[in-house]
Image (cartoon, rainbow, N blue to C red):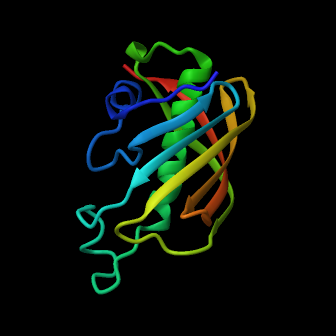
Amino acid sequence: MSVQMNIHEILETLPHRYPFLLVDRVLSMDPGKEIVALKNVTINEPFFPGHYPHHPVMPGVLIIEAMAQVAALLSFKSMVTDTEKKSVYYFAGIDGARFKRPVTAGDQIIFKVTLLRSMRGLFKFKAIAEVDGQLVAEAELMCTSKTVE
């Protein structure tokens, strides 16, 4: 089953808001398995004025954060959690993070995240980010779900 999500559905699922929401659309998702999503990177991003003003690039840590947000979308839709209970996904670990090329204004990042395993509330994902079919970043992410009040 292929699921798509627009920005309104993403906002209903994730607790993140501007300027920290880093996912614009879900192109496809097979709940419990994998997801493909995108982020349009514009010159209006709040990090560009301070991150190399003469050669603005998206900070690698924000690319990793975007991967985690995409992974959280997959988790929420896979676990059939009630988003009204205010579940939040936290990082539990990041392994093998590699950055292959910079992301600049005008790029469209395609995120591909695969669920490797889920055990007792701990999720492990393989995540890659591509721009124009070229690998930008990759990492294995571990996340855990907590209900907040």
Q: In which quarter of the image is the N terminus?
A: top right
Is 87 drawn above or below residue 17 in the view shown? above
The outermost residue toward the bottom is 54
- The quarter of the image holding the C terminus is top left
Q: In this view, does 28 lie to the left or right of 45?
A: right
Q: Which of 2 and 105 is in front in this view?
A: 2
- The number of callouts visible is 0
Q: In which quarter of the image is residue 101?
A: bottom right
Task: Please give the name of the residue rendered at 26% of the width and 45% of the height, measured from the top-left corner.
Answer: 18
Q: Where is residue 107 in the image (x, y as percent from the top left)?
A: 42, 65
Is 136 placed above or below 116 here? below
Q: Which of 133 and 119 is in front in this view?
A: 133
Q: Residue at image x 40%, y 71%? A: 104
User: Residue 54 in the image: x percent, y percent?
Assistant: 29, 87
Where is residue 142, by image quadrant? Answer: top right
The answer to whether 46 appears left or right of 4 in the picture is left
Residue at the (34%, 69%) spot, across then down: 105
Horizontal and vertical percent position of residue 39:
42, 51
Left/right placement of residue 49 relative to residue 61 reads: left
Residue under the point 30% across and 66% down: 47
Closest to the observer: 90 or 60?
60
Camera-side residue of 23 and 85:
23
Residue 123 drawn at (x, y percent): 68, 34
Q: Is residue 149 above or below residue 139?
A: above
